[in-house]
Amino acid sequence: MAAPKVAVVGAGVVGLSTALCIAETCPSCSVTVLSDQFSPNTTSDVAAGMLIPHTYPGTPIDVQKQWFKETFAYLFALSNSTEASEAGVHLVSGWQIFKNTPTPKEELPFWSDVVLGFRPMSEAELQKFPQHQFGQAFTTLKCDCPPYLLWLEKRLKATGVQMYTRKVADLWELHSEYNIIVNCTGIGAHQLVGDEKLFPVRGQVLKVHAPWVKNFIRDGDGLTYIYPGIHRVTLGGTREKERWSLSPDPGTTKDIFDRCCSLEPSLRGAQDIKVKVGLRPSRWCVRLEKEVSSRGGVKLLVVHNYGHGAGGFSVHRGTAKEAARLVGECIAALQGSSSRAKL
Amino acid sequence: MRVAVIGAGVMGLSTALCIHEQFHGLLPALHVEIYADRYTPHTTSDGAAGLWQPYPSDCGDLQETVWNKETFDYLLGHLGSPAATEMGLFLISGYNLFTRPVPDPSWKNIVLGFRNLTPKELELFPGYSYGWFNTAMVLEGRRYLPWLSNRLKQRGVKFFHKKVESFQEVSGDGVDVVINCTGVRAGELQPDPELQPGRGQVIKVLAPWVKHFIITHDIESGIYNSPYVIPGSELTVLGGIYQHGNWNEENSAQDHKTIWESCCRLLPALQKAKIVEDWSGLRPARPRVRLERETLRHGHGQAEVIHNYGHGGFGITIHWGCAMAAARLFGSILQEQRPAQPRL
């Protein structure tokens, strides 16, 4: 069999990192990225890129933890290298605070031993947040976009991966050009493969200039958060299930700003407020699996890697590696069947 | 009552403000004047990164520890105010790194969330085997001094651009109390062999991805002679120079090289940082802060002097506690000068 031809559909953080993992693990493969959107117009570009995992109800916790660990380790090394600023990856410390003490109080999130220095907040630290009873302090990583996506694109080009702007309406379009299709279309999978279990969770955020904010603050309810990036601070947010609108909502903008200012009053002086909307590609569990479909005797080999919801950045490298492994299995199966065909 | 403050660094301006805030209500005839040959942005305080952090090991001076705590609490109280950003004040977390275990500092309970570093965190800093993490604050001199100046001008405090050559020069002119906040050059007004310059040099860079302060310590090299990285609101300060007895305020190419190489070794990501400027300054180093009254007699009479200088590399850290202590000394001067009140 000639060099396997792999098409990765989707150029958000999952598509690009998956393409990179495939190129890394299968040097003989020819990998192409196809997407109707590239940075700065992907869902990933709206996200703050904080490594604070979302919990998928339908994925075993040890699997999610493994994905997070791998992603964290990968970015940790990157943050401490000379490429850190170009890749937009940096450490950030801060607090997750709760208005009511979660019960039981001692319950630790599954990722508490992966992030750095995780511990309960002291009384003195909590005084900064008079409406909150309890909190956790830790240090984690942030992937700023567009820099991270642009860095991935640069790495891809260096390994010979081609990238094309193309709207794929049906995965079957690709079967004659490519041996294996990797579906990293995020929220696009709803239409592309008709996945009814995938639904948008609309998030509106503000990206503001407030360079004196050096720590993150996140309300444990997940609705209010302040994430300082390299040039801008992301203020959030909303989690609106089944809402598809990508238009910013002015009332929501004011509400987000007010909620964030109540946690961090100095934000009143923030400048140049930009509003963005993204649709988290949410699902009970990440769809990370092979699918073989047939049509008139022709097979279509697809590896799905989508449905990361609010946790894309947190697990992207871990799921990309798993997807690359599944691609490897597909290639082995193809080579097995092609050598059988030679007999 | 005329009060002349000599020096317009963080000490001079904050002491003037503290005294005016506390006593103007009681003494409507209180006139405070500032005399200095250097104003922001040309003072020592302007070059400082402005991180609130005392030396890792104090000499057991409890009074200085109290002043540090008073300053921290005062600044913490201002964090939520609308003035914070204009003052150049913000919270920041970060790392202190050591090559071997050290005792906890006297200020561990003053800062927020003080703890030791975990092994995984230490992986970030090869060559360092022990360290602390805590949350403190930065108060940028370049913003704080103009903010103080504005508050003072609003209160009617007068500013004079003048090099004062002697205490008599101001006290002989009808000034009742002189506040000596002349920093490293206090010896020009009154010899003080204990006061020496602790020359420092820094490189200010654009590295907005750095969100933590990182201070390394090398017991052999001594304080501040080991690399440090302190993010400001716009620029990041790289440092690690402390030269006792060196009066040279010119930037040194050798020091630049030392700072750059050691900071890039500490944080490889800095290699891509854009260098904006170098700056040198003289820390007013002294074994102990000089904060005391002195009565100076001269031809016509006497003047009261309150000395408030010698804060080394921790001026920002200790300034408000010292300003309040100086204000208390001022209060005691007022008490002595009031005619005795008959008891009813």
Image (tube, rainbow, N blue to C red):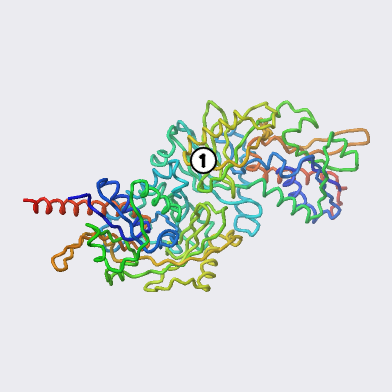
Given residues A153 and B123, the one toward you in this image is: A153
| Number of numbered discs on residues | 1
| Depth order, front residue of B97/A306 | A306
Specify the subunit that label 1 lies on.
B
Looking at the image, which residue is at 47% across and 41% down? B269
Is A294 drawn above or below residue B172 in the view shown?
below
Q: Residue at x 42, y 73 (%)?
A: A245
Across and down, in percent, residue A322 comes to 26, 53
Q: Residue at x 47, y 50 (%)?
A: A93
Given residues A91 and A181, the one toward you in this image is A181
Task: Describe the element under mark 1 as helix, strand or loop.
Answer: strand
Residue furthest to the left in view is A343
Amino acid of disc 1: Ile
Q: For residue B117, which quarter of the picture?
A: top left
Find residue A278 and report its horizontal and vertical position in percent: 42, 66
- The image shows residue B19 at horizontal and vertical percentages of 76, 49
Drawn side of residue A75 relative to residue B338, left or right: left
The residue tagged 1 is B214
Residue B102, placed above or below residue A255: above
Q: Nearer the viewer, residue A51 or A259?
A: A51
What residue occupies the far right of the structure in this picture? B300
Task: Bin the neighbour count of mark 1 within 10 Å (Cα to Cα): few under 14, some 14-19, many 20 and up.
Answer: many
Q: Is residue B219 above or below residue B307?
A: above
Above or below residue B92? Residue A283 is below
B282 relative to B125 in the view: left or right: right
Residue A163 spot, x, y in % from top left: 36, 55
Please tell me which residue is depicted at 54% across the width and 32% down the height of the picture: B226
